[in-house]
Image (cartoon, rainbow, N blue to C red):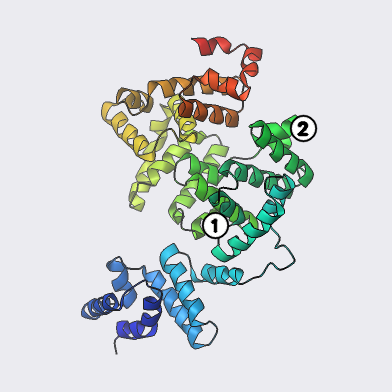
Protein backbone atom coordinates (compact mmCIF):
# COMPACT_ATOMS: atom_id res chain seq x y z
CA UNK A 1 0.00 0.00 0.00
CA UNK A 2 1.34 3.46 -0.91
CA UNK A 3 1.97 6.14 1.71
CA UNK A 4 -0.71 8.36 0.17
CA UNK A 5 -3.34 5.60 0.25
CA UNK A 6 -2.48 4.77 3.86
CA UNK A 7 -2.92 8.47 4.80
CA UNK A 8 -6.22 8.67 2.89
CA UNK A 9 -7.61 5.62 4.65
CA UNK A 10 -6.55 6.96 8.05
CA UNK A 11 -7.84 10.52 7.81
CA UNK A 12 -10.34 10.39 4.95
CA UNK A 13 -13.35 9.97 7.24
CA UNK A 14 -12.19 12.90 9.38
CA UNK A 15 -11.76 15.20 6.36
CA UNK A 16 -15.12 14.29 4.87
CA UNK A 17 -17.02 14.57 8.17
CA UNK A 18 -15.53 18.02 8.79
CA UNK A 19 -16.66 18.98 5.24
CA UNK A 20 -13.17 20.14 4.32
CA UNK A 21 -13.19 17.74 1.36
CA UNK A 22 -15.80 15.69 -0.46
CA UNK A 23 -15.25 11.96 -0.93
CA UNK A 24 -14.84 12.44 -4.69
CA UNK A 25 -12.26 15.18 -4.26
CA UNK A 26 -10.34 13.02 -1.79
CA UNK A 27 -10.21 10.14 -4.29
CA UNK A 28 -9.07 12.46 -7.10
CA UNK A 29 -6.30 13.88 -4.90
CA UNK A 30 -5.23 10.38 -3.87
CA UNK A 31 -4.94 9.34 -7.52
CA UNK A 32 -2.76 12.38 -8.26
CA UNK A 33 -0.53 11.61 -5.25
CA UNK A 34 -0.04 7.98 -6.34
CA UNK A 35 0.72 8.93 -9.95
CA UNK A 36 3.35 11.44 -8.80
CA UNK A 37 4.64 9.22 -5.96
CA UNK A 38 4.16 11.96 -3.38
CA UNK A 39 2.36 12.14 -0.03
CA UNK A 40 -1.33 12.95 0.20
CA UNK A 41 -0.54 16.16 2.06
CA UNK A 42 1.84 17.30 -0.67
CA UNK A 43 -0.79 16.65 -3.36
CA UNK A 44 -3.42 18.60 -1.42
CA UNK A 45 -1.02 21.50 -0.90
CA UNK A 46 -0.04 21.59 -4.60
CA UNK A 47 -3.69 21.72 -5.64
CA UNK A 48 -4.58 24.37 -3.06
CA UNK A 49 -7.09 22.19 -1.22
CA UNK A 50 -5.34 22.17 2.15
CA UNK A 51 -1.87 22.90 3.50
CA UNK A 52 0.51 20.01 4.02
CA UNK A 53 0.76 21.07 7.67
CA UNK A 54 -3.01 20.66 8.11
CA UNK A 55 -2.77 17.07 6.86
CA UNK A 56 -0.04 16.40 9.44
CA UNK A 57 -2.36 17.83 12.11
CA UNK A 58 -5.16 15.55 10.84
CA UNK A 59 -2.89 12.53 11.24
CA UNK A 60 -2.16 13.59 14.83
CA UNK A 61 -5.90 13.90 15.46
CA UNK A 62 -6.45 10.42 14.08
CA UNK A 63 -3.79 9.03 16.44
CA UNK A 64 -5.61 10.64 19.37
CA UNK A 65 -8.87 9.09 18.16
CA UNK A 66 -7.26 5.64 17.95
CA UNK A 67 -5.91 5.99 21.50
CA UNK A 68 -9.35 7.01 22.77
CA UNK A 69 -8.13 10.45 23.88
CA UNK A 70 -10.73 12.29 21.81
CA UNK A 71 -14.29 11.69 20.65
CA UNK A 72 -15.09 11.74 16.94
CA UNK A 73 -17.33 14.78 17.47
CA UNK A 74 -14.52 16.80 19.06
CA UNK A 75 -12.03 15.55 16.50
CA UNK A 76 -14.29 16.80 13.69
CA UNK A 77 -14.71 20.19 15.40
CA UNK A 78 -10.94 20.49 15.88
CA UNK A 79 -10.36 19.56 12.22
CA UNK A 80 -12.80 22.28 11.13
CA UNK A 81 -10.84 24.87 13.15
CA UNK A 82 -7.53 23.69 11.67
CA UNK A 83 -8.81 23.67 8.10
CA UNK A 84 -10.96 26.81 8.14
CA UNK A 85 -9.21 29.07 10.66
CA UNK A 86 -5.65 27.93 9.94
CA UNK A 87 -4.81 27.43 13.62
CA UNK A 88 -2.61 24.64 14.98
CA UNK A 89 -3.95 21.49 16.67
CA UNK A 90 -2.94 22.50 20.20
CA UNK A 91 -4.81 25.81 19.89
CA UNK A 92 -7.88 24.03 18.49
CA UNK A 93 -7.90 21.59 21.40
CA UNK A 94 -7.54 24.44 23.90
CA UNK A 95 -10.54 26.19 22.36
CA UNK A 96 -12.56 22.98 22.58
CA UNK A 97 -11.61 22.57 26.22
CA UNK A 98 -12.53 26.21 26.97
CA UNK A 99 -15.89 25.78 25.27
CA UNK A 100 -16.89 22.97 27.61
CA UNK A 101 -16.27 24.97 30.79
CA UNK A 102 -19.27 26.16 32.78
CA UNK A 103 -19.55 29.53 34.45
CA UNK A 104 -22.01 28.36 37.10
CA UNK A 105 -22.26 30.63 40.11
CA UNK A 106 -18.65 31.82 39.82
CA UNK A 107 -17.52 34.25 37.15
CA UNK A 108 -14.56 33.10 35.06
CA UNK A 109 -11.84 35.65 35.75
CA UNK A 110 -11.38 38.25 33.00
CA UNK A 111 -9.54 41.33 34.16
CA UNK A 112 -10.38 43.46 31.13
CA UNK A 113 -14.05 42.54 31.51
CA UNK A 114 -13.98 43.36 35.20
CA UNK A 115 -12.46 46.75 34.38
CA UNK A 116 -15.26 47.44 31.87
CA UNK A 117 -17.82 46.50 34.50
CA UNK A 118 -16.14 48.70 37.13
CA UNK A 119 -16.15 51.62 34.65
CA UNK A 120 -19.88 51.17 34.08
CA UNK A 121 -19.39 50.35 30.39
CA UNK A 122 -21.07 46.93 30.62
CA UNK A 123 -23.43 45.39 33.15
CA UNK A 124 -22.54 42.28 35.22
CA UNK A 125 -25.05 40.35 33.10
CA UNK A 126 -23.34 41.46 29.87
CA UNK A 127 -19.97 40.51 31.37
CA UNK A 128 -21.15 37.00 32.28
CA UNK A 129 -22.83 36.49 28.91
CA UNK A 130 -19.80 37.81 27.05
CA UNK A 131 -17.46 35.45 28.91
CA UNK A 132 -19.79 32.52 28.21
CA UNK A 133 -19.99 33.36 24.49
CA UNK A 134 -16.22 33.84 24.39
CA UNK A 135 -15.61 30.41 25.88
CA UNK A 136 -17.87 28.79 23.30
CA UNK A 137 -16.62 30.71 20.25
CA UNK A 138 -12.93 30.96 21.08
CA UNK A 139 -13.06 34.77 20.73
CA UNK A 140 -11.63 37.00 23.47
CA UNK A 141 -14.27 38.76 25.57
CA UNK A 142 -13.59 42.25 24.22
CA UNK A 143 -14.06 41.17 20.61
CA UNK A 144 -17.29 39.36 21.52
CA UNK A 145 -18.61 42.64 22.97
CA UNK A 146 -17.41 44.61 19.92
CA UNK A 147 -19.04 42.19 17.48
CA UNK A 148 -22.31 42.33 19.43
CA UNK A 149 -22.22 46.14 19.25
CA UNK A 150 -22.12 46.49 23.03
CA UNK A 151 -18.86 48.50 23.00
CA UNK A 152 -16.85 50.38 20.36
CA UNK A 153 -13.34 49.25 19.32
CA UNK A 154 -11.98 52.53 20.76
CA UNK A 155 -13.40 51.65 24.19
CA UNK A 156 -11.78 48.20 24.06
CA UNK A 157 -8.46 49.83 23.19
CA UNK A 158 -8.75 52.16 26.21
CA UNK A 159 -9.51 49.21 28.49
CA UNK A 160 -6.53 47.23 27.17
CA UNK A 161 -4.25 50.26 27.66
CA UNK A 162 -5.64 50.81 31.15
CA UNK A 163 -5.26 47.14 32.11
CA UNK A 164 -1.67 47.27 30.89
CA UNK A 165 -1.04 50.21 33.23
CA UNK A 166 -2.65 48.26 36.09
CA UNK A 167 -0.47 45.23 35.35
CA UNK A 168 2.67 47.39 35.38
CA UNK A 169 1.69 48.91 38.74
CA UNK A 170 1.40 52.43 37.29
CA UNK A 171 -2.24 52.92 38.35
CA UNK A 172 -4.90 51.19 40.44
CA UNK A 173 -8.02 49.55 39.04
CA UNK A 174 -10.11 52.34 40.56
CA UNK A 175 -8.02 54.98 38.75
CA UNK A 176 -8.18 52.99 35.53
CA UNK A 177 -11.97 52.61 35.72
CA UNK A 178 -12.40 56.32 36.40
CA UNK A 179 -10.08 57.21 33.49
CA UNK A 180 -11.90 54.95 31.02
CA UNK A 181 -15.29 56.27 32.17
CA UNK A 182 -14.10 59.90 31.84
CA UNK A 183 -12.58 59.32 28.39
CA UNK A 184 -15.85 57.83 27.20
CA UNK A 185 -18.12 60.52 28.64
CA UNK A 186 -15.93 63.47 27.61
CA UNK A 187 -15.03 61.97 24.19
CA UNK A 188 -11.33 62.40 24.77
CA UNK A 189 -8.44 59.91 24.84
CA UNK A 190 -7.47 57.80 27.84
CA UNK A 191 -4.09 59.46 28.38
CA UNK A 192 -5.67 62.92 28.59
CA UNK A 193 -8.34 61.63 30.99
CA UNK A 194 -5.72 60.08 33.28
CA UNK A 195 -3.46 63.15 33.06
CA UNK A 196 -6.40 65.35 34.12
CA UNK A 197 -6.67 63.17 37.21
CA UNK A 198 -3.19 64.39 38.19
CA UNK A 199 -1.24 61.26 37.21
CA UNK A 200 2.35 62.05 36.13
CA UNK A 201 3.06 61.86 32.40
CA UNK A 202 6.03 59.51 32.79
CA UNK A 203 3.71 56.83 34.21
CA UNK A 204 1.38 57.09 31.22
CA UNK A 205 4.02 57.06 28.49
CA UNK A 206 3.83 53.87 26.43
CA UNK A 207 6.64 52.69 24.21
CA UNK A 208 5.79 52.31 20.52
CA UNK A 209 5.46 48.56 19.98
CA UNK A 210 5.37 46.03 17.17
CA UNK A 211 1.57 46.00 17.00
CA UNK A 212 1.39 49.77 16.46
CA UNK A 213 4.12 49.54 13.81
CA UNK A 214 2.19 46.86 11.90
CA UNK A 215 -1.02 48.90 12.26
CA UNK A 216 0.66 52.06 10.97
CA UNK A 217 1.96 50.01 8.03
CA UNK A 218 -1.59 48.71 7.34
CA UNK A 219 -0.20 45.18 7.74
CA UNK A 220 -2.86 44.36 10.34
CA UNK A 221 -6.32 45.79 10.86
CA UNK A 222 -7.41 47.55 14.04
CA UNK A 223 -9.71 44.64 14.86
CA UNK A 224 -6.93 42.06 14.39
CA UNK A 225 -4.58 44.03 16.61
CA UNK A 226 -7.16 44.53 19.36
CA UNK A 227 -7.98 40.81 19.38
CA UNK A 228 -4.29 39.88 19.44
CA UNK A 229 -3.56 42.34 22.26
CA UNK A 230 -6.40 40.95 24.33
CA UNK A 231 -5.27 37.35 23.75
CA UNK A 232 -1.67 38.26 24.59
CA UNK A 233 -2.81 39.85 27.85
CA UNK A 234 -5.06 36.89 28.74
CA UNK A 235 -2.42 34.25 27.98
CA UNK A 236 0.59 36.28 29.18
CA UNK A 237 2.34 35.80 25.83
CA UNK A 238 4.32 38.35 23.78
CA UNK A 239 2.12 40.14 21.25
CA UNK A 240 4.27 39.04 18.30
CA UNK A 241 3.82 35.38 19.30
CA UNK A 242 0.04 35.76 19.28
CA UNK A 243 0.05 37.57 15.91
CA UNK A 244 2.17 34.78 14.46
CA UNK A 245 0.09 32.01 16.05
CA UNK A 246 -3.12 33.53 14.69
CA UNK A 247 -1.60 33.70 11.21
CA UNK A 248 -2.13 37.45 10.92
CA UNK A 249 1.43 38.10 9.68
CA UNK A 250 4.32 35.90 8.63
CA UNK A 251 7.39 35.07 10.66
CA UNK A 252 9.55 37.01 8.18
CA UNK A 253 7.47 40.19 8.68
CA UNK A 254 7.57 39.77 12.47
CA UNK A 255 11.35 39.38 12.38
CA UNK A 256 11.81 42.39 10.08
CA UNK A 257 9.43 44.50 12.18
CA UNK A 258 11.37 43.69 15.35
CA UNK A 259 14.60 44.84 13.68
CA UNK A 260 12.95 48.02 12.41
CA UNK A 261 11.47 48.72 15.83
CA UNK A 262 14.96 48.59 17.32
CA UNK A 263 16.17 50.99 14.61
CA UNK A 264 13.34 53.38 15.54
CA UNK A 265 14.46 53.27 19.19
CA UNK A 266 18.03 53.97 18.08
CA UNK A 267 16.66 56.86 15.96
CA UNK A 268 18.02 55.35 12.76
CA UNK A 269 14.51 55.49 11.29
CA UNK A 270 11.40 57.46 12.16
CA UNK A 271 8.18 55.58 12.81
CA UNK A 272 6.90 56.62 9.38
CA UNK A 273 10.01 55.33 7.65
CA UNK A 274 9.82 52.00 9.45
CA UNK A 275 6.12 51.65 8.60
CA UNK A 276 6.77 52.31 4.92
CA UNK A 277 9.48 49.63 4.89
CA UNK A 278 7.13 47.10 6.52
CA UNK A 279 4.45 48.01 3.99
CA UNK A 280 6.85 47.32 1.13
CA UNK A 281 8.13 44.12 2.69
CA UNK A 282 4.59 42.76 2.85
CA UNK A 283 4.47 42.86 -0.97
CA UNK A 284 7.67 40.79 -1.30
CA UNK A 285 7.39 37.17 -2.41
CA UNK A 286 11.01 36.10 -1.84
CA UNK A 287 13.72 36.63 0.75
CA UNK A 288 15.90 38.16 -1.98
CA UNK A 289 13.30 40.85 -2.62
CA UNK A 290 13.19 41.65 1.10
CA UNK A 291 16.97 41.90 1.26
CA UNK A 292 16.98 44.23 -1.73
CA UNK A 293 14.60 46.60 0.04
CA UNK A 294 16.78 46.63 3.16
CA UNK A 295 19.87 47.30 1.02
CA UNK A 296 18.59 50.41 -0.76
CA UNK A 297 15.93 51.86 1.55
CA UNK A 298 18.15 54.11 3.69
CA UNK A 299 19.18 56.54 0.94
CA UNK A 300 15.65 56.77 -0.43
CA UNK A 301 14.08 57.48 2.94
CA UNK A 302 16.60 60.15 3.92
CA UNK A 303 15.26 62.32 1.11
CA UNK A 304 11.68 62.10 2.35
CA UNK A 305 11.62 62.65 6.11
CA UNK A 306 8.94 65.35 6.17
CA UNK A 307 6.55 63.72 3.64
CA UNK A 308 6.86 60.40 5.46
CA UNK A 309 5.86 61.96 8.77
CA UNK A 310 2.76 63.37 7.10
CA UNK A 311 2.03 60.05 5.38
CA UNK A 312 2.40 58.28 8.71
CA UNK A 313 -0.18 60.66 10.22
CA UNK A 314 -2.55 60.19 7.29
CA UNK A 315 -2.04 56.42 7.48
CA UNK A 316 -2.89 56.42 11.20
CA UNK A 317 -6.30 57.88 10.30
CA UNK A 318 -6.89 55.25 7.56
CA UNK A 319 -7.27 57.97 4.93
CA UNK A 320 -5.18 56.02 2.43
CA UNK A 321 -5.41 52.34 1.53
CA UNK A 322 -2.32 50.11 1.14
CA UNK A 323 -3.09 50.00 -2.59
CA UNK A 324 -3.03 53.82 -2.81
CA UNK A 325 0.27 53.96 -0.93
CA UNK A 326 1.79 51.36 -3.24
CA UNK A 327 0.55 53.30 -6.28
CA UNK A 328 1.98 56.53 -4.84
CA UNK A 329 5.36 54.89 -4.28
CA UNK A 330 5.39 53.58 -7.87
CA UNK A 331 4.49 57.00 -9.33
CA UNK A 332 7.09 58.71 -7.14
CA UNK A 333 9.82 56.42 -8.46
CA UNK A 334 8.67 56.82 -12.06
CA UNK A 335 8.49 60.64 -11.87
CA UNK A 336 11.46 60.93 -9.45
CA UNK A 337 9.31 62.98 -7.08
CA UNK A 338 8.54 62.80 -3.39
CA UNK A 339 5.58 60.56 -2.52
CA UNK A 340 3.43 63.48 -1.42
CA UNK A 341 4.01 65.38 -4.66
CA UNK A 342 3.37 62.30 -6.77
CA UNK A 343 0.22 61.41 -4.83
CA UNK A 344 -1.29 64.91 -5.00
CA UNK A 345 -0.36 65.39 -8.68
CA UNK A 346 -1.82 61.98 -9.47
CA UNK A 347 -5.03 62.71 -7.53
CA UNK A 348 -4.35 59.79 -5.18
CA UNK A 349 -4.25 62.12 -2.19
CA UNK A 350 -6.82 64.90 -1.89
CA UNK A 351 -5.21 68.31 -1.37
CA UNK A 352 -7.78 69.18 1.29
CA UNK A 353 -6.74 66.06 3.25
CA UNK A 354 -3.07 67.01 2.81
CA UNK A 355 -3.66 70.56 4.08
CA UNK A 356 -5.59 69.26 7.09
CA UNK A 357 -2.78 66.77 7.80
CA UNK A 358 -0.20 69.58 7.65
CA UNK A 359 -2.25 71.66 10.10
CA UNK A 360 -2.60 68.62 12.36
CA UNK A 361 1.14 67.92 12.30
CA UNK A 362 1.92 71.57 13.01
CA UNK A 363 -0.38 71.54 16.04
CA UNK A 364 1.20 68.31 17.31
CA UNK A 365 4.76 69.60 16.74
CA UNK A 366 3.94 72.80 18.63
CA UNK A 367 2.55 70.80 21.54
CA UNK A 368 -0.92 72.31 21.13
CA UNK A 369 -2.52 68.85 20.97
CA UNK A 370 -1.34 65.29 21.55
CA UNK A 371 -0.88 62.86 18.70
CA UNK A 372 -3.98 60.78 19.68
CA UNK A 373 -6.02 64.00 19.73
CA UNK A 374 -4.63 64.87 16.30
CA UNK A 375 -5.61 61.50 14.88
CA UNK A 376 -9.13 61.78 16.32
CA UNK A 377 -9.61 65.34 15.01
CA UNK A 378 -8.14 64.62 11.56
CA UNK A 379 -10.35 61.54 11.15
CA UNK A 380 -13.41 63.54 12.24
CA UNK A 381 -12.55 66.40 9.82
CA UNK A 382 -12.31 63.93 6.93
CA UNK A 383 -15.46 61.96 7.77
CA UNK A 384 -17.60 65.07 8.43
CA UNK A 385 -16.00 67.11 5.62
CA UNK A 386 -15.21 70.05 7.90
CA UNK A 387 -12.08 72.16 8.42
CA UNK A 388 -9.46 70.81 10.81
CA UNK A 389 -9.90 73.87 13.07
CA UNK A 390 -13.64 73.12 13.25
CA UNK A 391 -12.85 69.54 14.23
CA UNK A 392 -10.70 70.83 17.08
CA UNK A 393 -13.53 73.10 18.21
CA UNK A 394 -15.93 70.16 18.13
CA UNK A 395 -13.78 68.30 20.67
CA UNK A 396 -13.02 71.40 22.71
CA UNK A 397 -9.29 71.47 21.93
CA UNK A 398 -9.07 74.83 20.12
CA UNK A 399 -8.06 76.64 23.33
CA UNK A 400 -4.68 74.90 23.21
CA UNK A 401 -3.93 76.51 19.84
CA UNK A 402 -4.54 80.07 20.94
CA UNK A 403 -2.57 79.47 24.12
CA UNK A 404 0.48 78.57 22.05
CA UNK A 405 -0.05 81.26 19.44
CA UNK A 406 -0.49 78.87 16.51
CA UNK A 407 -4.03 79.92 15.57
CA UNK A 408 -2.75 82.03 12.67
CA UNK A 409 -1.41 78.89 10.97
CA UNK A 410 -4.97 77.55 10.71
CA UNK A 411 -6.30 80.69 9.07
CA UNK A 412 -3.60 80.80 6.42
Judged from the image, the secondary structure of the residue bearing numbered disc 1 is helix
* Residue 365 visible within the image: no
* Classed neighbour count for the residue bearing mark 1: other residues with Cα under 10 Å, few (<14), some (14–19), many (≥20): many
Q: What residue sits 56% from the left and 27% below the top?
A: 374
Q: Using the image, determine if residue 84 lies above or below residue 180.
A: below
Quadrant of residue 298 within the rendered picture: top left
Instruction: Please name whichever residue, 366 or 144, is drawn nearer the observer in this view of the structure.
Output: 144
**Whole-percent x, y for residue 178 in the image:** 75, 39
Judged from the image, the secondary structure of the residue bearing numbered disc 2 is loop
Quadrant of residue 171 within the rendered picture: top right
Q: Using the image, determine if residue 290 lies above or below residue 323.
A: below
Cα separation between marks 2 and 1: 33 Å
Instruction: Report which residue position mark 1 lands on.
Output: 242
Dot placed on the residue nearer the N-terminal end, 2 or 1 = 2
| 217 left or right of 95 in image | left
Instruction: Report which residue position mark 2 lands on.
Output: 197
Amino acid sequence: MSQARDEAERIGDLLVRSELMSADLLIDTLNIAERMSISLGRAMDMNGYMSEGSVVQALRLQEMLERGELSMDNAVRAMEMIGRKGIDLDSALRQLQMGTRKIGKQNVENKVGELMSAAGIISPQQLNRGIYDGLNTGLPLGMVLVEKGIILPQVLEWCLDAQGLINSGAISQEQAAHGVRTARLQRTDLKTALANMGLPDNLLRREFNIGELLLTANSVTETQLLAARELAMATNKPLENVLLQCGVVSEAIISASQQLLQMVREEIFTVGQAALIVRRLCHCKTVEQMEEIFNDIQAELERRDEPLELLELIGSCRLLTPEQLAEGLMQARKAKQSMLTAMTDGNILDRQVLNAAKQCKHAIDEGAITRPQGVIALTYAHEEQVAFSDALKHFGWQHSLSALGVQQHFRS
